[in-house]
Amino acid sequence: MPQSPLLLRRLLRAKDKMDASPHEAWPIERLAEASAVSTAYFAREFKKAFGLPPHRYLLTRRIERATALLRETDLPITDIALQTGWTSLGTFGRIFRDITNESPGELRTRTQAAADHARHVPECVMRNAQRPNLISAVLEKRRSKATGKL
């Protein structure tokens, strides 16, 4: 059954709030309140509408922002982690590696070395190619690696 336009507008309101401030804490209760629906209903309908649960969507936004800051600035990795909403540098590094398959420092080194080659590629193409893939959960990826089934 398709979602009503009113519900989609409410879900978009919560999604827009996460997009505007991905560095803030966004517990499911706060997002559901912004959408004026119950928490369980919000989580279920958000995933149905956008293809990802709210937490994975927020992780995607944070990692995208961290990746952009690593590529475009010389800020210390600790500052980038704090600016993108992480309270623990260890958690940031672990999740960043799980999603991108490289540490923040490795990504910065690789992208700085490749910057000269990518000057003539449109930015929208580069961003789409570098968008993190969170279709499967981080824990699912770790289990797959541990069992050797990728």
Image (tube, grey):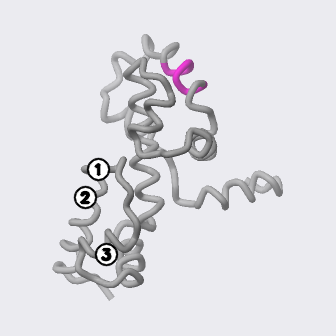
Q: Height in image: 63 above or below 121?
A: below
What is the distance, in whole Å, between disc 3 and disc 1 at their CAs?
16 Å
Residue at image position (41%, 72%) is 47
Q: Height in image: 21 above or below 73?
A: below
Number of the label disc, if any, that sits on residue 17? 2
The residue lying toward the viewer, choosing from 95 and 90, is 90
Q: Earlier in the sequence, mark 3 or mark 1?
A: 1
Check whether the beta carbons of the residues at disc 3 and disc 1 lie within 8 A of each other: no
What is the distance, in whole Å, between disc 2 and disc 1 at their CAs?
6 Å
What is the distance, in whole Å, between disc 3 and disc 2 at their CAs?
12 Å
Residue 128 in which image quadrant: top left
Magenta segment boundaries in residue numbering: 106-111
Residue 142 in which image quadrant: bottom right
**Residue reaching furthest bottom?**
1
- Residue occupied by mark 1: 21
Q: Height in image: 118 above or below 132?
A: above
- Residue occupied by mark 3: 32
Q: Position of residue 136 (x, y in %)?
A: 58, 60
Residue type, label 1 = Ser
Check whether the beta carbons of the residues at disc 2 and disc 1 lie within 8 A of each other: yes
Q: Secondary structure under badge 2?
A: helix
Q: Is residue 72 left or right of residue 37?
A: right
